[in-house]
Amino acid sequence: MPGDDRGSVTSVRDRRADDPLSIVRFEHDTLGTPFEDPMPALRAAASALLKGPPIRLRLEHAETLLEHFQETARHRGWVLHAVAIMANHFHLVTEVDGDPDPGKVLADFKAYASRRLNREFGKPQSETWWTDKGSKRKRKDEAALQNAIHYVLYEQPYALVIWSPKLGRLAVSEATSPISREEENDGDPRRPQA
């Protein structure tokens, strides 16, 4: 949650004390930037906007999502390069023809996945599985694409499911998640995989 005591990745664009002086505001939600420090007022404001308890995906949800992300990409003619699904968010790297709005691409993945999750697990109390919007970035060249794929496949220590078309399903780290057991609803969703 934005402002969380453990730190958070947010779109706060203010200057940190250690940022150089500049007329440009700094974006603090990009790869390589440190987590934001706790911000109790931001966390309280974000909590007040919740429509229900926070969603915590379990392994069963993640497996369903992976299957559906693959199906959506096939249906749309997109190339899905990498997927990592965590208990509270997901990362996708996908290649699409033309120059569509990245928001539309993300919305398609979320909409089709929501229908499937609702059908298999029922609607959550908030009536939605996702927050509005979400981070999405176009990659400018092959090197940037490969960096994004590497990030999704190898820098997600708390993933429930990690997949790529070249490598298949990858083994997931058994590291302890920063999400407390109480928050996970049904215990540790990262149980050993078949």
Image (tube, helix red, strand yellow):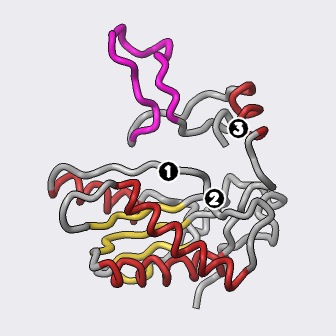
Residues shaded magenta: 11-30
Q: Which residue is mark 3?
A: 46
Q: CA distance from mark 3 to mark 1?
A: 15 Å
- In this rendering, the label closer to the viewer, 2 or 3: 3
Residue 186 location (% of width, % of height) = 81, 72
113 horizontally vs 165: left or right:
right
The amino acid type found where label 2 is placed reads Asn
Residue 84 position (above or below residue 70): above
Describe residue 55's horizontal placement relative to residue 66 as left or right: right
The one of 2 and 19 positioned closer to us in this rendering:
2
Sequence-first tag of 3 and 1:
3
Q: Which mark is residue 134?
A: 1
Residue 181, placed above or below residue 14: below
Mark 1 or mark 2: whose residue is earlier in sequence: 2
Most common secondary structure along the magenta stretch: loop
Dividing the image into 4 quarters, which one contains the C terminus? bottom right
Where does residue 70 sit, x and y in percent of width and height?
Answer: 41, 81
Image quarter of residue 126: bottom right
Residue 88 numbered mark, or none: 2
Q: Amino acid at mark 1?
A: Gly
- Name the residue type under label 3: Ala
Q: Is residue 142 left or right of residue 95?
A: left
Residue farthest toward the right in the current orientation of the protein: 182
Quarter of the image for the N terminus: give it. Answer: top right
